[in-house]
Image (tube, grey):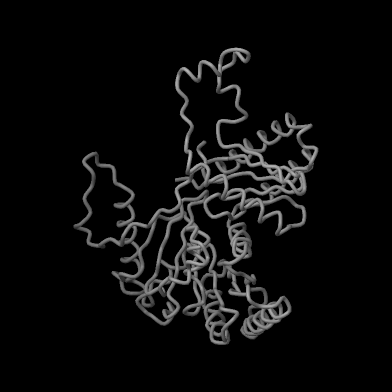
Amino acid sequence: MSFNPPLRETLPAERSKDANSIVQSPSGVKSPAELTLQRIQYQASASAQNKDAVKPGDPTVGLLPKGKPRLLLMGQRRSGKSSISSVVFHKLPPNETLFLESTARIQKDSMASFMEFQVWDFPGQIDVFDHVNFDMEAIFGEVGALIWVIDAQDDYLEAVSRLNATVLTLQRSYPNINIEVFIHKVDGLSDDYKLDIQRDITIRIQDELSDHGFENAPVTFHLTSIYNHSIFEAFSKVIQKLIPRLGTLEAMLTNLCRTCRFEKAYLFDVLSKIYIATDSATADMASYEICSDYIDVIIDITEVYGTWHRSDETRKKLEGEPWNTKLDEQIGCSTAESCLVLHDSNKPIMLREVDRYLALVAIMTDDSYDRMPLVNMNVEAVVDGLTEFFNITKPRK
């Protein structure tokens, strides 16, 4: 089984911008690090010609090669930004987030995922718009989404005020940035109180934006908590907005469910358990939770057993009588594939790996075993289509 993606890839340390420090490889081909430094120097020289540009050489902003969507986590201090990043992207148990220290500087992670996106965690005490040393183009120029975290169990008036100021500033210069508001830490609140808080925050933000002439600013609101799957559901909605031609993926999964009579199908990013697409049926949190937990089971089993290497003698026995067929032709697929039957509902859950980062997980009906050859054929066709889709939409280098 190859179902074992790397859990984390830390960004390179911030490098010096001294042109004399760039040394080309003996072959004359510049490495990605050298190209990155040259791009930084070019941006710095271009910014110096702009009267509003920041001073080059700011040590707080390290840049990466272009082409990677960026998620910015912002909000007040102790609102839960670092906890969200640790739970969603680094599989930290929610109870252990109580021991996380407060973020003192910008934390940047490059996620080894299907779309190679970045996550930047900003300290709550830093307001990037109040510091002239921050390069706004370097921070917001490649942003896919700005995630503003508001602590629902604290006084959120100051957080809403800062968010309004941030949205107004970004709408003038970067109107295409998606603003996602996570009304966080709602696990200890009643359903009515959660809705009241969401309604109050929504009205305060929309009224402020309307007063300044922004009627349809791209601001979306989510109720989240790290102690349930709501935070993964919210991040799924955020990531889906960054996927080109998402409707094509949804149509493929809808056709699969209709053909095989599946109840629900998800395309998961196995690293974060974020689903990047699902069929057109009404979303069900219970089905998402069981599929998400099933991915954890498969990953844990893979980490324990790894790839199963068979000896030559064992392979000969398996390829002999009564099959007389090569082992590679006896298996359903060369990558991870599994099926689990829930005892209480008799509904099989099928998992099929698309690549090292993506997995198709579907909830089947109780009579699915009678049609498994047809099911496998259709699933294989969809997996081939998904692979082709991501090859086509992949950014060209």
| Residue 246 on image: x %, y % | 65, 52
| Residue 354 on image: x %, y % | 58, 40
Q: Look at the picture and state if 57 lies above or below 262.
A: below
Q: Is residue 298 left or right of residue 397?
A: right
| Residue 257 on image: x %, y % | 76, 43
Q: Look at the picture and state if 292 lies above or below 53.
A: above
Q: Is residue 348 left or right of residue 298?
A: right
**Residue at 43% in and 68% down:** 139
Outermost residue on the front side: it is 343
Give the position of the C terminus as an image quadrant: top left
Report if residue 293 is visible in the image. Answer: yes
| Residue 199 on image: x %, y % | 70, 80
Report if residue 252 is visible in the image. Answer: no
Q: Look at the picture and state if 211 lies above or below 56.
A: below
Quarter-of-image position of residue 181 = bottom right
Quarter-of-image position of residue 230 = bottom right
Q: How many marks?
A: 0
Q: Nearer the viewer, residue 310 or 236?
A: 310
Q: Look at the picture and state if 77 lies above or below 258.
A: below
